[in-house]
């Protein structure tokens, strides 16, 4: 999602005027705030499991029934390495439930 789920952009992030993400609704106004609420939950879980937000998102995605692969973008070698380290990320049932609840809350307002 254009870097949103990497967890590195803060609520007050200002996009460069050349950054095309400025044009996407998920990075504007109420959608931005609600997406940041979701990322806040992911950040807490990432800290608990000693992983990055991106690793938590990848692990959650791979843990879904029927999911056999995940496509994720990487521009730098360290991002590829970090994505690979997702195999070390351990999510307990409580973590999964909290992620599900946060996604459900976010989706109530999606438009």
Image (cartoon, rainbow, N blue to C red):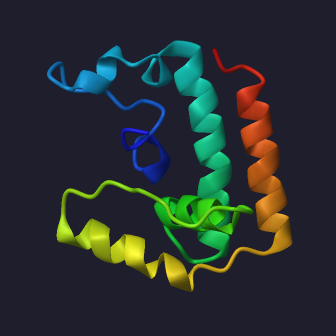
Q: Is residue 5 left or right of residue 22?
A: right
What residue is rendered at 57% in x and 20% in y?
31
64 above or below 33? below
48 vs 104, left or right, is left
48 with respect to 51 (left or right): right
x 71%, y 31%: residue: 106
Q: For residue 59, what is the image quadrant?
A: bottom right
Q: What residue do we see at 69% from left, 62% from top?
A: 66
**Residue 7 visible, this orientation:** no
Asked if residue 1 is positioned above or below residue 45 in the image, the reply reads above
Q: Quadrant of the C terminus?
A: top right
Q: Is residue 101 visible?
A: yes
Image quadrant occupied by the N terminus: top left
Number of marks:
0
Residue 107 image point, x, y percent: 72, 29
Above or below for 86 versus 73: below
**Is residue 110 or residue 33 the one in the foreground?**
110
Q: Nearer the viewer, residue 10 or 105?
A: 105
């Amino acid at each position: 999602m254009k870097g949103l789920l990497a967890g590195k952009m803060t609520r007050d992030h200002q996009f460069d005027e050349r950054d095309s993400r400025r044009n996407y609704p998920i990075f504007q106004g109420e959608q931005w705030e609600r997406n940041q609420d979701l990322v806040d939950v992911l950040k807490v879980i990432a800290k608990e499991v000693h992983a990055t937000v991106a690793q938590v998102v990848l692990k959650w995605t791979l843990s879904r029934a029927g999911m056999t692969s995940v496509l994720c973008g990487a521009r730098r070698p360290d991002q590829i390495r970090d994505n690979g380290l997702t195999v070390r990320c351990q999510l307990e049932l409580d973590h999964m439930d909290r992620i599900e609840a946060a996604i459900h809350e976010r989706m109530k307002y999606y438009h």
